[in-house]
Amino acid sequence: MALINDNKININLNLCNKNKIFTENNNEILIKYQETSSINSKYDVAENAFSFSEENLKEVSKILSKYPLEYKRSAIMPLLHLAQKQNNGWISYPIVEYISNIVGIPAIKILEIVNFYTMYNIRPTGEYLLQVCRTMPCWLCGAEEILKACKDILGIEIGMNTPDGVFSLREVECLGICIKSPVLQVNYDNYENLDYQKTVNLLLFLYKNI
Ligand code: FES
């Protein structure tokens, strides 16, 4: 995806019809945006039936063993996390039904939990889930610049995925490390004290290391 020659790094992001040049470590980075409607093939099978892998079934046993049999429902949240990780970062409806059968409560109760907590994703996410904190401390310290860098580089708005399935952009409430504002969370890692250029560099780095 990234070609490096003569101090120039070319990356095809397959997003839209505009080219942009950014600099990183004195190298010139040309971002070529190309129009495409293709979607990642993993989305085509996203709603297929779900079951835990052999390895994760062992983890399920461990999780369930922490709770009395009559309180299996207490395991819902760790089971959802496990399922989300196995399912490329999101909870499909078949997962909701599957976990409902494991813990023995109606699927609607699982859906309520999935919809309430923002750490559960109810739509397919890219390889990298970018979550920009826009709560007051981060906002005062430049969260909008972080968001602008994401939009400029990726060509998408909050709530969207890039067509190639690499990035998803979301906003999030306080991530609990306001002292390091502004903060961007990428999957399970937090990137702190960012500004526009640092965010651009981070996104290019992530893209080159898929
Ligand atoms: S406001 Fe962004 S981490 Fe707290």
Image: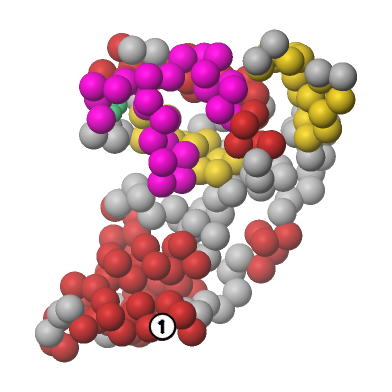
Q: Quadrant of the N terminus?
A: top right
Q: Is mark 1 within 8 Å of ligand 1?
A: no
The vertical placement of 76 against 187, above or below, is below
| Residue 136 in sight in this render | no
The image position of residue 114, as x and y in percent, is 34, 59
Q: Residue at x 86, y 25 (%)?
A: 5
Q: Quadrant of ligand 1?
A: top left
Q: Residue at x 39, y 13 (%)?
A: 142
Q: Residue at x 44, y 53 (%)?
A: 121
Q: Of residues 53 and 24, which is closer to you in this image?
A: 24
Q: Of residues 180 and 114, which is closer to you in this image?
A: 180
The image position of residue 31, as x and y in percent, is 76, 23
Q: Is residue 198 left or right of residue 76?
A: right
Number of marks in picture: 1
Question: Dot 1 surroundings within 10 Å: few (below 14), some, or many (20 or more)?
Answer: few
Q: Is residue 168 left or right of residue 186?
A: right
Q: Which residues are magenta?
A: 177-203
Tag 1's secondary structure?
A: helix
- Asked if residue 163 lies in the magenta stretch, the reply is no
The image position of residue 148, as x and y in percent, is 53, 18
Q: Quadrant of the C terminus?
A: top right
The vertical placement of 95 against 24, above or below, is below
| Residue 95 in sight in this render | yes
The vertical placement of 189 against 183, above or below, is below
The image position of residue 54, as x and y in percent, is 48, 84
Quadrant location of residue 48? Answer: bottom right
Q: Residue at x 38, y 83 (%)?
A: 58
The residue that disc 1 covers is: 57
- Asked if residue 187 lies in the magenta stretch, the reply is yes
Q: Amino acid at mark 1?
A: Leu
